[in-house]
Image: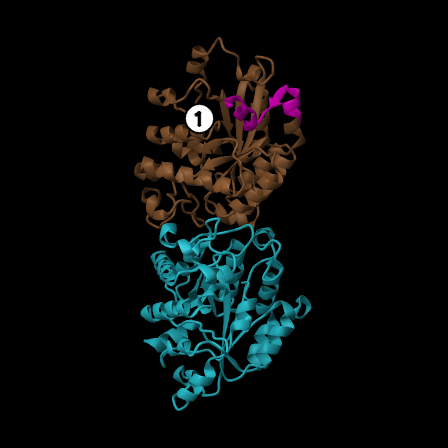
Chain colours: A brown, B cyan
Amino acid sequence: MYAFNLAVAILLITAPFSSAFAQTKTIAERLGYPRDSKLLIIHADDLAVAHSEDAASFDALDRHAVTSASIMVPCPWLTEVADYAKAHPDADLGLHLTLTAEWRTYRWGPVESKDKVPSLLDPSGYLWPEVEPAVHNLKADEVEREVRAQIEHAMALGIHPTHLDSHMGTLFARPDLFAVYVRIAHEYKLPFLAAFTPDAPKELRSLLTGKDVVLDSVIIAGPEVGAANWKAFYLSAIKDLRPGITEIIVHLGHDDAELQAVTVDHPDYGAAWRQRDYDAVTSPDFKKAIEDNHVILIRWKDLQKLLN
Amino acid sequence: MYAFNLAVAILLITAPFSSAFAQTKTIAERLGYPRDSKLLIIHADDLAVAHSEDAASFDALDRHAVTSASIMVPCPWLTEVADYAKAHPDADLGLHLTLTAEWRTYRWGPVESKDKVPSLLDPSGYLWPEVEPAVHNLKADEVEREVRAQIEHAMALGIHPTHLDSHMGTLFARPDLFAVYVRIAHEYKLPFLAAFTPDAPKELRSLLTGKDVVLDSVIIAGPEVGAANWKAFYLSAIKDLRPGITEIIVHLGHDDAELQAVTVDHPDYGAAWRQRDYDAVTSPDFKKAIEDNHVILIRWKDLQKLLN
């Protein structure tokens, strides 16, 4: 969440890679689909942040309204997600590596011992509330320690992550943090969401190998969509999908007392917003749009297999 | 919560103290009331554990349906309580010192850096889920470190605690832990809830000074009450109050999706239980019973003044 900056920041890295690997098989071909297939991951972020988020996301996963989701390991409802993961071993669950605790009245700290990651803590002892102070203060070696702790803690609870991404894009916001992210993903043989701005330093791209799967497009609703146009935004996005791999990122929740309190004073990515996302992805229209536009739904698990 | 053991464990320490200080003024007299007044603290435990708990407890505090409450500092909703405390500087809020994280699917860790308090952590890295393994594993010096961290963290967030007590009675369960509790309470000049079993070692009692205020009775509903008799239990308890200071301990919440998920698989002290407590203390019958029985409501703040 607070993903507006992320949405702005995400730009495609297909161009340089497409030219470099133009003669190789497309991901679609490697997955057994026609070369120009429109592949789509429908991805729910922020699992474990709240029970309301979990309940809505589990329901959407069970109904195949989303294909994939990722988990915030430092958050209070993690073991609820671990229970779900154990009961649903086929579920496509990654880790939403978390270095911020952005809500006003509901905060969390790191997984690692606090005195081993002091640069991750704001003055009140929780993770930084925004990307900006986080990026200003984080030490890369402490970030690496925390990211490893999050992965190991999730695995110790019985979660087998299928991919990695970065909550609020903090790991995309500094080259040395991105390097930590890529190095650890490679080490654990996990596919990961990558995002570059067009002016991102070239050394960032050089961290990727030809084996890394790069998405062609990432779609996320921003505040400019407007509540009245919510479903139409997604239906239009599905209609406009191009060949290649796209991820639609959603944040699912119920507009209830808990989530209203979690997101208090922050309508963007708030409880009603998440209810709208839930209503959109579970609507018959959404399903029909995918069918009508010959979109092939895939999961990070499919991409994970390509790494091995 | 899980306070049944606590309820069993709480026995009065009035007898030895009454004889020792029989000729001194009673607490009632020191507070300006007749010697044989029936003084009552109505106390909500577990603030910060969940938004549902906070909302119900704030409402009961605002309506003077409870006089006092105490806060679980390691829990996710702490800053919501800190906001309330700052907006309600007169509210009587103590710290419910917390060394356990007892719910199946919703867990929390210590406030102190984990590597400084390893004996407080269960194998999954959260606080112990029950009193028994906690008491078996806790090291007193690490408990002292964590208790100090909880008090300092609460104060750093703008909470001015009026008293201390112990979540699930863990600090009452071993003499060296009780010694930590009393020593820190004395140091911060805070009144505290004390509880002894009749066979408790005498050195426990010797930790208290003549200045410490000792309650004459503690009342808490247990599973044996039965849902149908909930309000009647409290009305009967109020009718039977004796002269001296009594604390009624309640756990307030709304029987909603969040609290149902927090207390999943545990009807005792569960969401419906907490709704019953809320309904009972906010009922006109409860208020009338207090008036009809000439009960004087007091707060820990009143007792705190006697220490200075």
Look at the picture and state if B142 lies above or below A44.
below
Q: Chain of mark 1?
A: A
Magenta span: predominant SS is helix
Quadrant of residue B269 in the image?
bottom right
Residue A208 appears in the picture as rendered = yes
Q: Position of residue B173 (x, y in %)?
A: 47, 68
Q: Position of residue B176 (x, y in %)?
A: 39, 68
Look at the picture and state if A27 lies above or below A97.
above
Name the side, left or right, on which B170 lies relative to A176.
right
Which element type, helix, strand or loop, lies under badge 1? Answer: loop
Amino acid identity at mark 1: Ala
Quadrant of residue B204 in the image?
bottom left
Say which of B50 and A143 sits in front. A143
Point out the residue furthest to the front here: B136
Where is mark 1, residue-wise? A194
Quadrant of residue A98 in the image?
top left
Say which of A28 and A251 sits in front. A28
Look at the picture and state if B274 lies above or below A141.
below
Q: Residue at x 43, y 78 (%)?
A: B214
Q: Residue at x 35, y 50 (%)?
A: A124
Crowding around mark 1 (Cα neighbors within 10 Å: few <14, some 14 to 19, many 20+) is many
Residue segment shown in magenta? A288-308
Residue A254 appears in the picture as rendered = no
